[in-house]
């Protein structure tokens, strides 16, 4: 098995991939491409993509390939702010339902309804729309494009770094219990129950927020859906499983050679700073929503992001402790 090291990537890179499944072979044959899937790397070891389960995030360290030719890395010719905006767009689409119809008809560029164009996703559409939102037109028609069209875009360049053989430890980690899968499941369950309650085509968590603001009659019911789902306490699993990330005295005693420990501490610090920017933005959003609308929904989300900011600051402090004492 092969893996793309995090060190090979920059935030905003696009990964085009393929596999030996029947679906991948059909997509590649119908689009005349070596690749059947597109993924947006959003930094800190995380990526966002759209597959049959909808739009969700993943951990690069869990992404394995059967052969090095099953993946290529593309880098968009743009500045960091453009990359940040593309990543913000992709995060906002998490939870969106996968559009089988659009994915199948993409080669024909069939015109779906305006509603579907705005509220459904598939892999290459998500990537192209993210960059178009940020001001970079990768392809002629972002709503209906293929991985091959992204590969041929004049706005990208291929990154020469190749996938390398994964170690036994990396393979073991990639196949271990994945908390992100649980998070995706919970998110999809929330969206499904909210759609049933509201009778609206709500596809993202941001759309839930907008609905509650406009329809406070659903405030308590939707807040209960969140409470019952476990969404508000998912962070507890991370703290319990990886206590070393939040306590410098534990972190510094992780059994690694000094150079590897220092490298890990730097990675943890940098990733935490990226998360902190996202969490602070959400924290401020729900602070003002709570001040203005006084909703239970905004209150529970304010409490959630307050805790996530605190945890992330602990992560940064633990990493700094290691760097200052090694």
Image (spheres, rainbow, N blue to C red):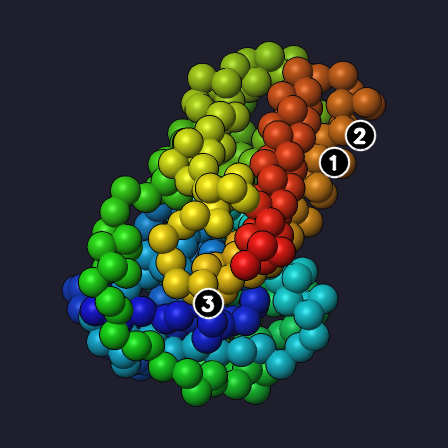
Q: Position of residue 70 (x, y in %)?
A: 28, 75
Q: Is residue 130 left or right of residue 236?
A: right
What kind of element bears circle 3? helix
Could you say which disc has been placed on residue 124 in the image? Answer: none
**Mark 1 touches mark 3? (CB < 8 Å):** no
Rendered position, 39 above or below 193: below
Label 2 crowd (10 A; few <14 / some 14-19 / many >=20): few
Quadrant in which the C terminus is drawn: bottom right
Q: Position of residue 51 (x, y in %)?
A: 36, 54
Residue at which label 2 appears: 288
Residue at figure coordinates x 24%, y 67% from the top left: 167
Residue at which label 3 appears: 259
Q: Do we see residue 157 in this rendering?
A: yes
Q: Position of residue 255 (x, y in %)?
A: 36, 53
Q: Do we see residue 271 in this rendering?
A: no
**Inter-mark Cα distance, 3 to 2:** 44 Å
Label 1 crowd (10 A; few <14 / some 14-19 / many >=20): some
Q: Which badge, 1 or 3, comes first in the chain's sequence?
A: 3
Residue at which label 1 appears: 285
**Mark 2 touches mark 1? (CB < 8 Å):** yes
């Amino acid at each position: 098995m092969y893996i793309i090291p995090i060190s090979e990537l920059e935030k905003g890179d696009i990964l085009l991939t393929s596999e030996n499944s029947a679906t991948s072979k059909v997509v590649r044959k119908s689009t005349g491409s070596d690749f059947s899937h597109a993924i947006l790397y959003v930094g800190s070891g995380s990526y966002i993509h759209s597959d049959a389960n909808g739009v969700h995030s993943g951990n690069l360290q869990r992404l394995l390939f059967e052969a090095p030719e099953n993946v290529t890395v593309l880098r968009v010719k743009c500045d960091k702010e453009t990359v940040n905006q593309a990543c913000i767009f992709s995060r906002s689409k998490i939870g969106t339902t996968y559009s089988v119809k659009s994915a199948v008809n993409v080669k024909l560029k069939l015109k779906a309804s305006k509603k579907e164009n705005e509220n459904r996703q598939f892999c290459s559409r998500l990537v192209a729309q993210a960059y178009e939102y940020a001001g970079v037109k990768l392809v002629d028609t972002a709503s209906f494009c293929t991985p091959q069209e992204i590969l041929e875009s004049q706005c990208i360049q291929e990154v020469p770094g190749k996938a390398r053989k994964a170690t036994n430890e990396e393979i073991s980690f990639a196949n271990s219990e994945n908390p992100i899968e649980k998070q995706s499941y919970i998110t999809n369950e929330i969206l499904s129950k909210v759609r049933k309650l509201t009778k609206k085509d709500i596809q993202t968590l941001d759309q839930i927020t907008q609905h509650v603001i406009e329809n406070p009659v659903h405030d308590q019911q939707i807040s209960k859906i969140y409470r019952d789902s476990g969404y508000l306490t998912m962070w507890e699993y991370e703290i319990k499983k990886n206590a070393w990330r939040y306590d410098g005295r534990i972190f510094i005693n992780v059994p690694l050679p000094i150079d590897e420990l220092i490298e890990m501490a730097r990675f943890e610090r940098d990733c935490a700073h990226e998360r902190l920017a996202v969490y602070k933005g959400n924290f401020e959003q729900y602070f003002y929503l709570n001040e203005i609308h006084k909703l239970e929904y905004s209150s529970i989300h304010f409490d959630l992001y307050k805790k996530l900011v605190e945890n992330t600051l602990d992560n940064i402090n633990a990493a700094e402790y290691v760097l200052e004492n090694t």
